[in-house]
Amino acid sequence: MKVYHQMGFRDKWNIDCLKSGIGDGLIFSPINMDSDKLLALPKTIREKSFLDPQFYLLNREKSTNITYPFFPGNIKTDFSTADLDIFNSKLAEICVDYQVDADLEYIIIPTRYVDAVPTRYLEQMTENFIYPFLRIKEQKNITKKFLLTVVVKQIMIEDNDKLNELLNWLTGISNIAGFYLIFENNFTSKQIKNFDYLTKVLFFIDVLKRNEFEVHIGYCNTEALVYSAAMPDSITIGSYENLRMFKISRFEMSEGKGMHAPNPRLYSSKLLQWMDYNYIESMKSLVDNYDSYFDDTSYKPLMFSLGEFKDKAFKWHFAKSEIYKHYFEVFYSQIKSLASDQFERIEQLKTMIKIAIDNYSIIENAVLLDGDSDGSHLAIWYNVLNSYKKTL
C-alpha cells in the first residue's frame, strides 16, 4: 500500500520528506502550487505523483490555480455549472494533455462539489466528466491509468439506498483503473468514532477492490489505519488538519488568513492519536518515562528538549515544521509495517489498538484527557475491524 503526501500550504515540508525517502509520491494541489513550480520538480518526483485538478468549485479563482491551462476560468470568464455542457470536451482535452505532458503517474478525472446531491448527479458526472475524459483517452491512445475523483459524502455512506446506487454506478464504469476517493463527513471529533460509518466505508472500499479497481484514498487522518484493512492501493498523509479531513471551505478561503490557530498536537503511533501539547506538558510532570509514549525520530530530541537540546526549550506552535515532519516519518513507517496478507493485517491492527489502550490506561491514571486526545476512539475501531473481518 502506497502513501502519498496530500499537498497544501507549506508543501516544501512534503517535498523535503519525500526526497528523504518518507512517502511514495505527492498529490499536487493547484490552489497551493503554481504550474511552473510543479513542472520544475524533477521528473523522478513527478512520475510517481499525481495531480488533483480541483474542479470542485469550478470558478473559484486563486493566484495559483489560474496558472494551470485547464482552470475553467481560463476558458470562459465566470465559468458556471451550465458551461460544462458546452465546454466539457475542451476542458477534458486540456486537463488530460497537461497531466500527460507533466509525466504524472496517473491521469485524474476531476469532479465538481455539490452541497446537496441533486437527482441527476451521477448522470451529470458521467456526461460532463467521465465520457469527455475517456473520449480523449481513446482518441489520443493514452496508455496511462485513469482515476476518477469521487467525493463520497456522509449521506452516501450512511443511507443504504444511496450507498448501493453509488456503488452500482462506480462498478459499472469501464476503461478506468480506479478511483481517487475523498470521504467527506461532518464529525466534530478529531478521530472518527462512529461504528456504522466506518463499517460501511470498509464495505465500500471492499466492493471496489473486489471489482478489481484501484482505490486511492485522499485526505486521510489516523483512520487510514482502519481503512487499510480493506486493502486500498494508497492512503495519504497531510500536515494541517484541512489536509487530513476534506472540507470545501479550504477552496473558498485564503489559507493562513483569518483562521483561528489550533493547539499544536503531536502524533504517537503508540497511542494512535494526536496528543494536544498541553497534555504532553502534564505528562512530563506526572507520568514516568512520559517521552517513551512518543516515537523516536530526528525531530523528537528538539521537541522534547532531550540530549544536546535540553537547554533549548521547544516553543510549541501548530505551524512548527518539526511536528508534521515527525508525523510523516512515524505514520509512514507505521503504514509500511502492515502485513501484506489481509487477515494478518487486521490482526496486526487489532494488536496495535490493544497496546494503545494499555498505554492509555497507564497515562490516564495520572493525567485526565479530553475526548480529542484520549483513546475513546480505539474500542470502536477494534469493533469495526472485528465486524469487517466477519464479512471476509
Image: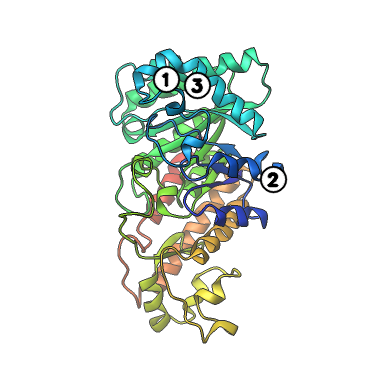
- The quarter of the rendered structure image containing the N terminus is top right
Q: Is residue 86 above or below residue 335?
A: above
Amino acid type of the residue that numbered disc 3 sits on in the rendered structure: Leu
Image-quadrant location for residue 152: top left
Secondary structure found at label 2: loop
The x, y position of residue 386, in whole percent, is: 45, 45
Does residue 172 appear in this view?
no
- Residue at which label 2 appears: 42
Secondary structure found at label 1: helix
For label 1, the crowd category at 10 Å Cα-Cα, with few meaning under 14, some 14 to 19 and many 20 or more, is some
Q: Which mark is residue 91?
A: 3
Q: Is residue 19 above or below residue 208?
A: below
For label 3, the crowd category at 10 Å Cα-Cα, with few meaning under 14, some 14 to 19 and many 20 or more, is many
Q: Which residue is drawn at the image coordinates 51% and 58% (left, top)?
A: 352
**Do the residues under discs 3 and 2 have CB atoms within 8 angstroms?**
no
Q: Which residue is drawn at the image coordinates 37% and 44% (left, top)?
A: 250
Image-quadrant location for residue 96: top right
Q: Is residue 336 above or below residue 309?
A: above
Amino acid type of the residue that numbered disc 2 sits on in the rendered structure: Pro
How far is the residue under mark 3 from the one under mark 1?
Answer: 14 Å
Q: Which mark is residue 125?
A: 1
